[in-house]
Each structure stands twice: as structure tokens, then as C-alpha cells.
Amino acid sequence: MKLKDGAMKIAKLKIKRDRPTRLGHPWIFSGAIESVSSEPERGETVLVTSFSGDPLGYGAWSPASQIRIRMWTSSVNEPIDDTFFQHRVTTALAIREGMNERFDTNALRLINAEADGLPGVTVDRYGDVLVGQFTTAGAERYKQVIVQTLMQQTDAVACYERSDADGRMREGLEVSNGLLAGVLPRMPIIIRESNVRYGVNIVSGHKTGFYLDQRENRRLIASYAKGRTVLNAFSYTGGFGVAAQVAGASAVTHIDLSEMALEQAKQNTELNGGMADEAARFLQGNAFQLLREFRDRSQTFGLVVLDPPKFADTKSQTMKALRGYKDINLLGIKLVESGGLLATFSCSGAVDPRMFRMVVAEAAHDAGRTVRILHELRQAPDHIEALTFPEGLYLKGLLCIVE
């Protein structure tokens, strides 16, 4: 982190390119940087200054990424050392104190990257096990102290790493999966959301194993499911459909491309008391294609849930993503019986809530249906957001009544 003369390496921003940093946005793109006093190592802490030399804080250097610096702090009086990361972890845990009781669950997000002042660090808790993703150069550099602090400050028995997201490769980092601390219990881990239970495989599942960001949305949507037939498209391991099952849905159809995910969905169905064979269906295949087949057979459902994977990783992919969201919502709306419900989501950060509402409105128009919004949905509260980082609102959804 130091030059030979003891001075910290300095990244100077271009003229008039420092305003986002002054306002607290944690990302500095390569095009905003005028010069660097000396080339930093990957993940090394640099002092960021304005063009005129005003100190703006410290950040982690990412030489392979378009996001060249991710800010740790805007305070130049806050050294970036082990104590800094220990404090950030302690603060993140304190924010979530009591959330497991409040949300009646044993599974929570403990660290939510930029929103918790730790860009690239995501940590979820499933029962007694922590699962971490370290997707940036700075996060990788300080991974050990973050994990040690988490293990010391929680009663977790293990911490497992799932740093296999595409973002890590864009940072010039290799995939890194495996046990970081403790002893891993047998899979799956059973988690609880109120009276619904799910088996989670943190080793082979998506992301860190489960989509905890949808917890409160699962609860809300399930409250409308009693007596309805439910189509759970992009079901993964059954989340929305199993919650609807427990709430009294008359039938649930799960659709996913992954045979492994559907097998876990079957196990989660049985874990919650099961359903009659004809009431629970598990269809493997492309959701777009299967929804078209339902449409062509004039089959309808009382509740359709559309929770597709991310359609856009970057702003350059936004238009393609919007077309995908319109297509799937057009199909979904056509499959809702009159007076039925549509729950639809986007987890693409490049698609903002206004864009998403517009796309659903266009799909409703093309379907010739009247669609009214009952609830506007977002990620669960443990997935906190920072006012200075609007990109942190990545999950948006609508629960609608379709006539």
C-alpha cells in the first residue's frame, strides 16, 4: 500500500468527475481517473483525490475492472486495516440484530456489499452456517479478516465460500469455492420462514444457495394463494410454490430448467407435508416454451408467479432485457384466469422500477387485459440499501390483479 518513501498511492480524478464520489457513491469508473501516482496492486488501498488534490477518501484498486476503484470510506482519518473491517462487520450485524425474530426465520443476509460499506462482500446465514461471496479485488484482499470476525461474532459452525459469480471474473479473479472456517454439516441445510421449511444446498445451489431476498414477498404472495391453482415459473427449488402450498393452494405447478433444482423442489414439497400427486407438478424445461404451450391449450391459473433470472448484467444489455421481460409477462398475463393474480419480478439492476412497470403495462395492453397493482415489491429488509447507491435496489416486483 506504500511507496518507497512511505506515501500512499494516489488516484487523481479528472476535472468535474468527482461529484459522485463527493456525494458518497462507492464506484469510480476507469474513465473518471486522470492519473495514478504509481500502479497499485490488485485490491490495494489508494487515496482518491479530486483533480485539484482534495482528498475524497480511500478505495480498493481493481485493475481488470471498468469499475477501477470501489470506495471503502470517504474519511481520510479512517485507516483501512483489520480494525476497519472488524468495525464494518460489527456494524452490519448490529443493524440486523433481532431481525430473525422479527421476520420469524433462521436465514438472513448479514452483509449486503456496498450497502454495508463492504463492496463485493455478500454473506448469508442459513441456520448455523454462513455463506460468503467475495467478488471484488478489495473483498478478496481482506477476506480472511472478514471471515474471522464473522466467526468470532456469531455462533456459526462454518463459513463456506461461493465466489463463483461472473463479477469475480470481470475483476480478474478466479472462481473460489470451499470451506473457509469450521465444519460443514450434511446437506441440505433446513431453513425456516415462519411455518414454511426449505432444504438449501449451499455447495451446489444458485448464488449462496437460496434467494433470501424474496422472503417477505413469498410470505405476502402466499397469503393470496388459498384455494388457487398456482403456476411457479422459474421456480428454482420451489420457493414461492411451496409457500403457496403451505398457505392452502389447491394445486402448484413448478417450472425450471434445472433437474437438480426441481428435485429439491419435490423434497421441499414433501418437507412441508406434501400434496396429492395430481396437485403438485414439476416440469423441467424452458419456461418461455412451456408457458406458450399452456397458452396454446388455453390453460389458466389463479396465481402466476414469474421470477426469472437476471436478463441484464450491464446497461448495454437493457433493451434486450426489456424485450425478454415483456415477452414473459405477456405470456404470464394471458395465463391468469379472470380475477386471478400475477406476481412478476425483475432482478436486473440495469432495469429500474419505472422501466419494469412500463414493460408490464405494455404486456397487459398487448394481452388485452386490465391489470391493476395490489402491491409494489422489493428485496427483503435484511438486504438493506444505501441512499448513495441506487444500484443496490436490484429486485423489484409487482403483485397484480388481472381482469
Image: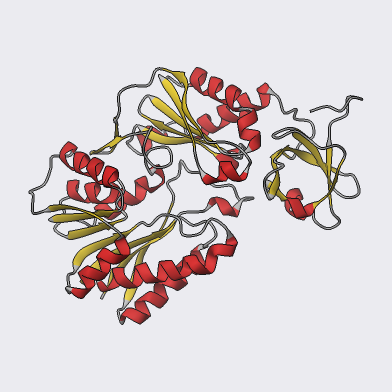
Residue drawn at the location 81% of the way across and 37% of the way down: 39
Q: Nearer the viewer, residue 256 or 325?
A: 256
> Residue 264 placed where, x, y %?
25, 40
Image position of 261 (left or right of 319) = left
Compared with 213, 303 (above or below) is: below
Residue drawn at the location 51% of the way across and 17% of the way down: 152
Which quarter of the figure has residue 156?
top left
Numbered circles on residues, count: 0
Residue drawn at the location 55% of the way across and 50% of the way down: 392
Compared with 299, 173 (above or below) is: above
- Look at the image and tell me whether residue 42 can be seen: yes
Q: Nearer the viewer, residue 103 or 65?
A: 65
Q: Which part of the image, by quadrant, shows the C terminus? A: bottom left
- Look at the image and tell me whether residue 339 can be seen: no
Image coloring type: secondary structure
> Residue 22 placed where, x, y %?
76, 49
Q: Which part of the image, by quadrant, shows the N terminus? A: top right
> Residue 127 placed where, x, y %?
35, 28
Image position of 140 (left or right of 246) = right
Residue drawn at the location 29% of the way across and 55% of the way down: 221
Image position of 131 (left or right of 4) = left
Which quarter of the figure has residue 364?
bottom left
> Residue 92 placed where, x, y %?
54, 33
